[in-house]
Amino acid sequence: MTPQAFALQVIDLVFTFLYLAIMARIILSWFRFDPYHPVSVFLYRMTEPILGFFRGIIPPVGMIDFSPIVAIVVLGIVQQILYLLIQSL
């Protein structure tokens, strides 16, 4: 395995984990779930730095928080940029 292929796999793994964590947090927000449950705490700690940043730029509108949507779009763009940078090496 070349170093480029390894780097691409690591990037893919990290971004896939972030996508899944954000989606899990979205789904958990639809239900009453113990906020002190270890799964909730873990998801909050993993996603809040990203979602909090975007929530500061785009505040919630009523009961709807658009920060997860914006975060997923921006993460996708960053992932593609990293792919292109690594492939150009």
Image (cartoon, rainbow, N blue to C red):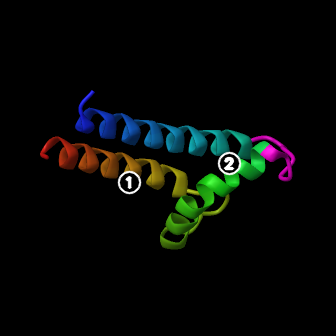
Say whether residue 29 is left or right of residue 70. right
Instruction: Say which element carries label 2.
Output: helix
Examine the image and state in which quarter residue 83 appears: top left
Residue sitting at the far top? 1
Residue span colored magenta:
30-38
Instruction: Say which element carries label 1.
Output: helix
Residue at 23% across / 32% down in the picture? 2
Say whether residue 60 is left or right of residue 41. left
Residue 74 seen in this snapshot = yes
Against 25, residue 61 (above or below) is: below
Please provide percent x and percent y for residue 26.
64, 44
Residue assigned mark 2: 43
Against 8, residue 89 (above or below) is: below
The alpha-carbon separation of the residues under discs 1 and 2 comes to 19 Å
Residue sitting at the far bottom? 56
Say whether residue 30 is left or right of residue 78. right
Identify the amino acid type marked 2: Leu
Against 17, residue 63 (above or below) is: below
Residue at 36% across / 34% down in the picture? 9
Circle 1 Cα neighbour tier, 10 Å, few/some/many (<14 / 14–19 / ≥20): few
Q: Inspect the magenta stretch and tell me whether residue 17 lies in it.
A: no
Foreground residue, 6 or 44?
6
Q: Earlier in the sequence, mark 1 or mark 2?
A: 2
Please provide percent x and percent y for residue 61.
59, 63
Residue assigned mark 1: 74
Decide whether the magenta segment is chiefly helix, strand or loop: loop
